[in-house]
Image: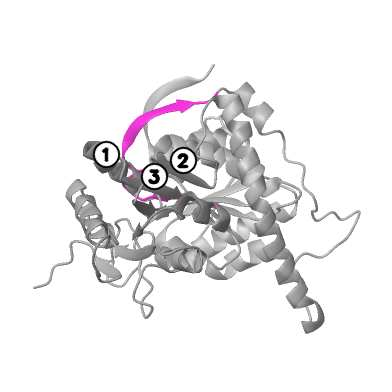
């Protein structure tokens, strides 16, 4: 039977790895994901996970190990954060280009310099073009559930792409919440044994990731994009099937709407800050403000975003990243692109929470006040939330 427990987000992810019955885990510690590889190490040592646990010398090597293992038909897992994700960058392209269904959890953390161990989402946002599916979670329960769903999505015959589950460092990894740990028998029905589509076999030799001359390289990239496009329907399907088995779902798996119907102002965001925004919307007690939480940043569900935002007069995008040189958040830029020609909504970019600065209830109230002001007058399109001006 399923069981309830109070646990850190890192432990919730480790439970998902145990339930997924992985074959190979590559481990290199980096704050704030270290608890994930520590917990899985203990589970392997105790016999709760029957997997090869490979301790490596760097995050680049961690990704190299899961690429090699996945290429032989193994179900794999690793985790990282921040500079670790940056060090993997070369191999992220390799995993995607070789169409390997690797699953990795990224504990979102600010990038250096200056050094920060605290949360923002600059690391995964900066990796948005490497060809990985990116799924952002709001709670520890969603981190566990999404890690399980990630294997179904990645291993789907029509997808065959790696998946990055993004959870806010410290905000989730080191915070304890009630989590329901599913029953192993239920999970085995939802997530059967891995049957690889292609893998290295000495009896049937083939090459993975060989040189591609100019006459085929473009077509291979186009195939990756086609797989990413097709992944949207798979994400929805897996979310529905997960809901049928475990009685939990997260919107349609791509986006989650909260009181968006008839809202004049809709806030758009990624990750755990959605909970704070929901609290502020609830305390208002009116129907003028709603929330659109984007769970799937890659693939970006353009049709879902357009549908959800088409009636809003003002859209305020709160995100924990900034595209230096563009001068606004990357998500805000993409939302503006998606909504181009779809109405007269004003789209405002709110850069918040960089380097772990708290996005408080008052911070969100201030964002909503600015959006409501924009209903009747011109305001700046880019705002740095709680910026110290002295």
Query: Dot 2 lies on which element?
Result: helix
Mark 3 residue crowding within 10 angstroms, few (<14) / some (14–19) / many (20+) = few
Mark 2 in CB contact with mark 3 (< 8 angstroms): no
* Earlier-in-chain disc, 2 versus 3: 2
- Earlier along the polypeptide chain: callout 2 or callout 1? 2
Q: Which residue is mark 2?
A: 143
**Residue range corresponding to the magenta coloring:** 164-182
Image coords of residue 143 (percent x, y): 46, 40
Q: Residue at x 51, y 56 (%)?
A: 306
Left or right, residue 195 beside residue 62: right
Residue at (47% x, 20% y) in the render: 3
Q: Secondary structure at mark 1?
A: loop
Q: CA distance from mark 1 to mark 3?
A: 11 Å
Identify the residue at horizontal 81%, vertical 81% (top origin): 215
The residue that appears at 46% across and 61% down in the rendered structure is 124
List the residue tagged with mark 1.
286
366 w.r.t. 179: above or below: below
């Amino acid at each position: 039977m399923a069981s309830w427990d109070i646990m850190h987000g890192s432990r919730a992810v480790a439970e998902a790895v145990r339930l997924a019955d992985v074959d190979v885990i590559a481990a290199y510690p980096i704050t704030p994901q270290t608890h994930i590889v520590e917990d899985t190490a203990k589970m392997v040592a105790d016999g709760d996970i029957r997997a090869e646990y490979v301790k490596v010398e760097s995050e680049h090597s961690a990704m190299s190990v899961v690429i090699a293992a996945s290429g032989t038909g193994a179900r794999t897992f690793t985790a990282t954060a921040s500079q670790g994700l940056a060090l993997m960058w070369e191999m992220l392209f390799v995993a995607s280009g070789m169409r390997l269904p690797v699953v990795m959890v990224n504990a979102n953390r600010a990038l250096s310099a200056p050094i920060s161990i605290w949360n923002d989402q600059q690391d995964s946002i900066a990796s948005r073009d490497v060809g990985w599916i990116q799924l952002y979670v709001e709670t520890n329960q969603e981190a566990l559930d999404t890690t399980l769903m990630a294997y179904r999505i990645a291993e789907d015959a029509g997808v065959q792409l790696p998946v990055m589950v993004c959870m806010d460092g410290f905000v989730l990894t080191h915070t304890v919440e009630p989590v329901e740990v599913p029953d192993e028998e239920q999970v085995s029905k939802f997530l059967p044994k891995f049957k690889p589509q292609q893998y290295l076999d000495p009896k049937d030799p083939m090459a993975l990731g060989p040189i591609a001359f100019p006459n085929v390289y473009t077509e291979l990239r186009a195939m990756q994009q086609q797989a990413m496009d097709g992944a949207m329907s798979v994400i929805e399907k897996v979310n529905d099937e997960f809901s049928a088995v475990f009685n939990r779902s997260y919107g349609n798996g791509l986006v989650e709407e909260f009181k968006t119907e008839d809202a004049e102002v809709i806030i758009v965001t990624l990750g755990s800050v959605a909970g704070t925004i929901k609290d502020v919307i609830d305390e208002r007690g009116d129907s003028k403000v709603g929330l659109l939480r984007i769970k799937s940043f890659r693939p970006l569900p353009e049709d879902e975003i357009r549908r959800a935002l088409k009636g809003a007069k003002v859209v305020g995008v709160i995100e924990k990243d900034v595209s230096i040189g563009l001068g606004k958040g990357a998500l805000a830029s993409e939302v503006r692109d998606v909504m181009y020609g779809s109405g007269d909504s004003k789209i405002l970019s709110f850069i918040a929470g960089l380097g772990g600065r708290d996005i408080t209830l008052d911070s969100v109230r201030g964002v909503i006040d600015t959006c409501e002001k924009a209903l009747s007058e011109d305001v700046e399109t880019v705002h740095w939330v709680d910026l110290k001006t002295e």
